[in-house]
Image (tube, rainbow, N blue to C red):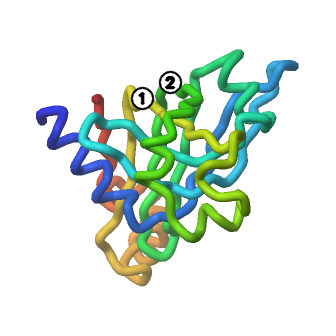
């Protein structure tokens, strides 16, 4: 699969999942996760979020840029885990190009607020688990596995995407 195809597949999986849990490493080496609103995955395989450059997450990314972002849509039986390298970007043109009314709730002074920044995640790889089976079929397969002692292997599609 080409990089463009991989990027398109990843975006297809997560575009309707508005919130991702961004995990960074704190100064005391603890994993810290927080919800972030997914802005987009661009054609270059970059994932974007808005952030304040004064926030703890900005400081954590500056010190230790390796991150994970997880997305879940349990109602669709979709789970995605993205690993990559993050950086804080203060490009005003980019900030303006992705600006939307939801972001304004977090930054009432608008896109020109001097502390508005973007988190750019350069995605290295992603994994997803996605089931097209109905909840009832999934439950039946799990019950069958419990009775037979053989784990279900056909409940979801599990793939790794490397960018």
Furthest residue toward bottom: 136
- Count the numbered circles shown: 2
Label 2–label 1 contact, CB within 8 A: yes
Quadrant of the snapshot with the N terminus: top left
Residue 150 visible in the picture: no
Residue 108's image quarter? bottom right
Instruction: Identify the disc placed on residue 20.
Output: none
Q: Which residue is mark 1?
A: 122
> In this view of the protein, which residue sits in the foreground, 130 or 71?
71
Q: Which residue is mark 2?
A: 85
Furthest residue toward right: 28
> In this view of the protein, which residue sits in the foreground, 10 or 95?
95
Residue 58 versus residue 145 in the image, above or below: above
Query: Residue drawn at (29%, 30%), measured in percent from left and top?
Result: 162
Query: Residue drawn at (37%, 61%), measured in percent from left and top?
Result: 15
Label 1 sits on a secondary structure element that is strand
Query: Residue drawn at (32%, 74%), measured in percent from left and top?
Result: 133
Q: Position of residue 18 (x, y in %)?
A: 51, 64
- Label 2 vs 1, first from the N-terminus: 2
Residue 2 versus residue 10 in the image, above or below: above
Residue 87's image quarter? top right
């Amino acid at each position: 699969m080409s990089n463009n195809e991989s990027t398109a597949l990843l975006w297809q999986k997560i575009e309707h999942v508005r919130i991702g849990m961004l995990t960074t490493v704190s100064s005391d080496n603890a994993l810290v996760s927080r919800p972030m609103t997914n802005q987009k995955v661009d054609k270059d395989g970059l994932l974007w979020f808005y952030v304040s450059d004064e926030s703890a997450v900005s400081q954590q990314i500056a010190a230790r840029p390796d991150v994970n972002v997880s997305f879940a849509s349990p109602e669709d039986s979709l789970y995605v885990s993205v690993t990559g390298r993050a950086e804080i970007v203060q490009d005003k043109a980019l900030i303006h190009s992705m600006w939307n009314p939801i972001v304004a709730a977090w930054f009432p002074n608008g896109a020109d607020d001097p502390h508005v920044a973007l988190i750019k995640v350069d995605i290295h790889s992603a994994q997803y688990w996605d089931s097209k089976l109905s909840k009832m079929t999934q439950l039946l397969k799990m019950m069958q596995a419990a009775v037979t002692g053989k784990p279900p292997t056909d409940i979801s599609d599990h793939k790794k995407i490397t960018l």
